[in-house]
Image: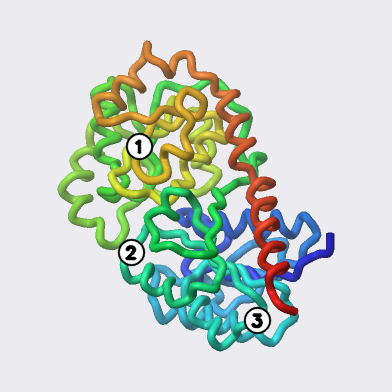
Amino acid sequence: MNALRIALISTPFVAVPPAGYGGTELVVHELAEGLQSRGHEVTLFATGDSRTSAQLRTFYDRAQWPPEPLVELNHVSWAMEKIAAGTFDLIHAHSALALGLTRLVPRPPLAYTIHHVRTPEFSAFYQQFPDQHYVAISTSQMRQEEPLSRCTVIHHGLDPLRFGPAGEPDDYVCFVARLSKIKGPDVAIDAAMAAGVPIRVAGEAHRGDQVFFSEEMKPRLELPHVTRLGGIGSPQKEALLRRARALLFPICWEEPFGLIMIEAMLSGCPVVAFGAGSVPEIVEPGVTGFVVEDTDEMAATIRPGGVLDSFDRRACRARAVERFSRDRLVDDHLRLYHEILKGTPA
């Protein structure tokens, strides 16, 4: 199979891979490294503090946080200009702005991954580009969107080698996400207290979460069974998950994917989650975790003497490798790329 020349457009907000928070950019990293390892010619358009084996092209020297629309437009329009002047077979963009710029750069063909929950503004925007190729990151996400005639579901995948072999857990459970109401960090702390187990909480409040943090999280983070870790990078996260009794994922929104779930599973750590959004298609009850209805059932599931005591962490990791590895991620994307190129006039 001939090597493809792929332009991969990341965001300008977080480095590839991210040092801390940044789900989209972590997936971009896995895709870039996986495609490059298969012999494809990948050019990654990202920030200058990124690390990659692909060819790196940068407009901004470092990540531009917090996100600003004009910064994104600057980054993506610059990338599309360079792509138009190059010899690429395909563009894979992770910014919706690239769709609009296809009016000026109609070739090469473009695939765009939707990383966010449905919003009316974005859904209406996507309807203006019915002939572009979309990637949804879960079936749940795709079903919530306005119908797109060219949309393929591809679950995220990660390099299993980053996650050590599953071993015996410690006594704590953990929560790893931003400290936002929709993610349920308050519920996780309450469930751990009801179960009588310690909990380690990793994450920070972002802009817009400050009222929730002050009113609900600050007093909870001072409780004796809680250890606050703040924002953590990949090495600390991997160590945390490897020894955790469970990852708690009590979301109250339509989560498009939830990358932390597969990070936990690849560590052999079961996910105990509320069944919203993508959870039912990611978590296999009894194999990689448990889907529960409320705080009481979450507490009952993680309580010592319950189902976690006999949970097979090695089988959990093996199943996660089967479903959510980097190799599977790359296989699925290459299949899509070739389908796009096959249907593109010369």
Q: Which mark is residue 275?
A: 1
- 107 is higher (above) or lower (below) than 121: below
Q: Looking at the figure, which quarter contains the C terminus?
A: bottom right
- From this viewpoint, is residue 200 visible? no
> Residue reaching furthest top?
305
Near-viewer residue (100 or 196): 100
SS class, disc 2? loop
CB atoms of marks 1 and 3 within 8 Å: no
What amino acid is at disc 3? Arg
- 135 is higher (above) or lower (below) than 95: above
Q: Which mark is residue 119?
A: 2
SS class, disc 1? loop
SS class, disc 3? loop
- 183 is higher (above) or lower (below) than 11: above
Q: Which residue is mark 3?
A: 107
Give the left or right position of residue 61, taking residue 143 as reference: right
